[in-house]
Amino acid sequence: MAHPHDGNLAAFNARPRAEAVADLLTCCASPAFAEEVAARRPYGDLDDLLDTAARAVRDLGWDEVLRALSAHPRIGERPAGEGRQAAWSRQEQSGVPDALRAALADANRAYERRFGHVYLACATGLTGAQLLARLEERLANDEESEREVVRAELAAIARLRLAKLLKEEGA
């Protein structure tokens, strides 16, 4: 049975490499990720694309992970800008009420002091309270464990954003 995004996947597979890479960078801001996923086209189905993207994120060197993190706003901050990434971040963080923003800001600062980078969580479907609780739990992680959590969260975000990309017109 045909998947509703099969036409968009075919268009993605057929895109010039530079355009595919540019689109992929809106899903994960690591050039190594975007190049890897673009290079593996064509994809037979959406699951193949999403699984490849998740593996590509998990295989990134830490410098590339940090590069990708630099494109993510702090959880609880209202992302600025008009681009696709900013719009997606606003949507993904829609469960964060204003009342929790100060607590998240404090916890974000503690996290950044501890690990040296922004706290990243796949916020889709989570409440502000859940995001704060996860942040506080992750403060207890050692560096290596936290890096694995960050990669998993980044992979989840890339998968979600790729699925959104294929739903958009012209993808």
Image: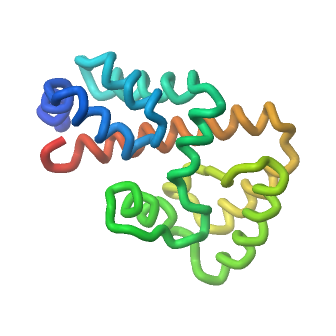
Residue placed at 77% from the left, 71% from the top? 106
Residue placed at 66% from the left, 60% from the top? 131
Q: Is residue 105 above or below residue 84?
A: below
Numbered circles on residues, count: 0
Q: In the picture, residue 44 is in which quadrant?
A: top left
Q: Residue 59, image x and y in percent?
A: 57, 22
Q: In the picture, residue 161 is in which quadrant?
A: top left
Q: In the picture, residue 84 is in which quadrant?
A: bottom left
The N terminus sits in image quarter = top left
Q: Is residue 54 left or right of residue 142?
A: left
Q: Is residue 131 above or below residue 13?
A: below
Q: Is residue 12 above or below residue 139?
A: above
Q: Is residue 60 left or right of residue 62?
A: left
Residue placed at 24% from the left, 32% from the top? 18
Colour setup of the view: rainbow
Q: Residue 45, image x and y in percent?
A: 26, 23
Q: Residue 92, image x and y in percent?
A: 47, 59
Q: Nearer the viewer, residue 72 or 2?
A: 72
Q: Nearer the viewer, residue 30 or 166?
A: 30
Q: Is residue 64 left or right of residue 103?
A: left
The C terminus sits in image quarter = top left
Residue placed at 28% from the left, 44% from the top? 165
Q: Residue 7, image x and y in percent?
A: 12, 33
Q: Is residue 171 above or below residue 32?
A: below
